[in-house]
Image: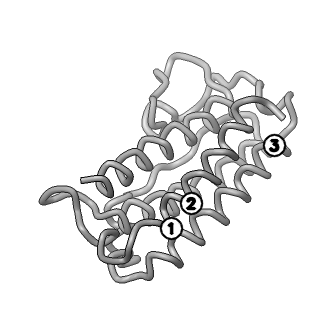
Amino acid sequence: MDQWLDDFGKTIGSASARLRQITETQSEQPQAEEHWSSKQIIGHLIDSAANNHARFVLAQMKDDLVFSGYDQDRWVQIQNYQQASWSQLVDLWQAYNLHLLHVMASASKEKLQQVCAQHSLQTIAFKTVAEAEPATLEYLMKDYVVHLKHHLAQIFADAES
């Protein structure tokens, strides 16, 4: 297994354990006014997993990386993560990411490294790629992990304050 995939697996394991130490009450508190609570951040990460799951599979069936984005704030609002059970959200987050790890590890090296001139990573990626620059599925997958770690760091910073 590639080092970045091994790192993703370790991140899922260690973050799951830390997330389970956060109480229901702590998970409901936003860090600041107009910011998401830990519940809403985990909900957003579940939504990101769902959207990227489709992208990771579809990218292996075509020769471009052109995908639509989604309105992350509306997704979080509509699904009312703030009222969901923290332990159930953590369970779903963990299970979904373990499945994504499997999907990522199952992708062929050829598809992972196929250079795509057409992509939408200038708008959908966390660390965007200029429209004129080529991109790969491996980049999109690694970007997903960077995005996930960014938001986990927010949750853990919230829990420590």
Question: Which is nearer the eye, 141 or 136?
Answer: 141
Label 1 sits on what residue type? Answer: Arg
Which disc number belongs to residue 20?
1
Residue beneath the point at 68% across and 25% down:
116
Label 3, secondary structure: give it: helix
Q: Would you name the residue on which mark 3 appears?
A: 105
Residue 69, percent across and down?
Answer: 46, 50
Residue designated by label 2: 17
Q: Position of residue 129 (x, y in %)?
A: 49, 24
Q: Name which of mark 3 and mark 2 comes first in the sequence.
A: 2
- Mark 3 or 2, closer to the camera: 2
Q: Residue at x 44, y 49 (%)?
A: 152
Which comes sooner in the sequence, label 1 or label 3?
A: 1
Q: Alpha carbon of mark 1 to alpha carbon of mark 3: how far?
A: 26 Å
Q: Residue at x 51, y 49 (%)?
A: 68
Left/right of residue 108 with respect to residue 36 in the rendered view: right
- Badge 3: how crowded within 10 Å, few (<14), some, or many (20+)? some
SS at badge 2: helix
Q: Is residue 32 left or right of residue 127?
A: left
Q: Quadrant of residue 35?
A: bottom left
Left or right of 151? Residue 65 is: right
Snapshot quadrant of residue 43: bottom left
